[in-house]
């Protein structure tokens, strides 16, 4: 369903943002990153998501090279477009 897909995209986005934070800022060993991000993805608020996007300088991929989906749903794409204008 559309609702199920939207939920899956939101969880995947949180997971990949958590991976970026864990690698880029915290320096967690690669072999621990995925499991830790799995724990974080279900408890992260939208406000924290938005702040992570800012702190991480608008990442578009996870540290593993996977795209971070649905950033525009957070309003991030709109903010970035406004900054570039």
Image (cartoon, rainbow, N blue to C red):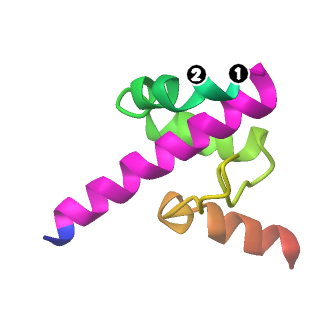
Observer-nearest residue: 66 or 57?
66
Q: Secondary structure at mark 1?
A: loop
The picture quadrant where one finds residue 4 is bottom left
Q: Is residue 63 left or right of residue 70?
A: right
Q: Is residue 13 magenta?
A: yes
Label 2: which residue? 32
Q: What is the span of residues highlighted in magenta in the rendered image?
A: 3-28
Give how far across and how far down residue 20 sits, in percent: 68, 39
Residue 37, compared with residue 79, is above or below; it is: above
Q: Residue furthest left?
A: 1
Q: Residue furthest front?
A: 31
Observer-nearest residue: 77 or 69?
69
Residue at 77% x, 72% y: name it.
82
Q: Are marks 1 and 2 in contact (CB under 8 Å)?
A: yes
Give how far across and how far down residue 77 sits, in percent: 64, 69
How far is disc 1 from disc 2 in space, using C-alphas?
Answer: 6 Å
Q: Which mark is residue 48?
A: none
Quadrant into which the C terminus falls: bottom right
Residue 39, compared with residue 64, is above or below; it is: above
Give how far across and how far down residue 51 sits, in percent: 65, 38
Label 1: which residue? 29
Residue at 66% x, 49% y: name it.
64
The picture quadrant where one finds residue 24 is top right
């Amino acid at each position: 369903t559309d609702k199920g897909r939207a939920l899956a995209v939101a969880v995947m986005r949180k997971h990949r943002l958590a991976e970026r934070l864990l690698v880029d800022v915290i320096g967690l060993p690669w072999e621990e990153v995925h499991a830790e991000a799995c724990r974080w993805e279900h408890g992260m608020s939208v406000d924290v998501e938005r702040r992570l996007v800012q702190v991480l300088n608008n990442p578009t991929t996870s540290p593993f090279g996977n795209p971070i989906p649905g950033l525009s749903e957070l309003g991030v794409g709109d903010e970035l477009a406004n900054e570039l204008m």
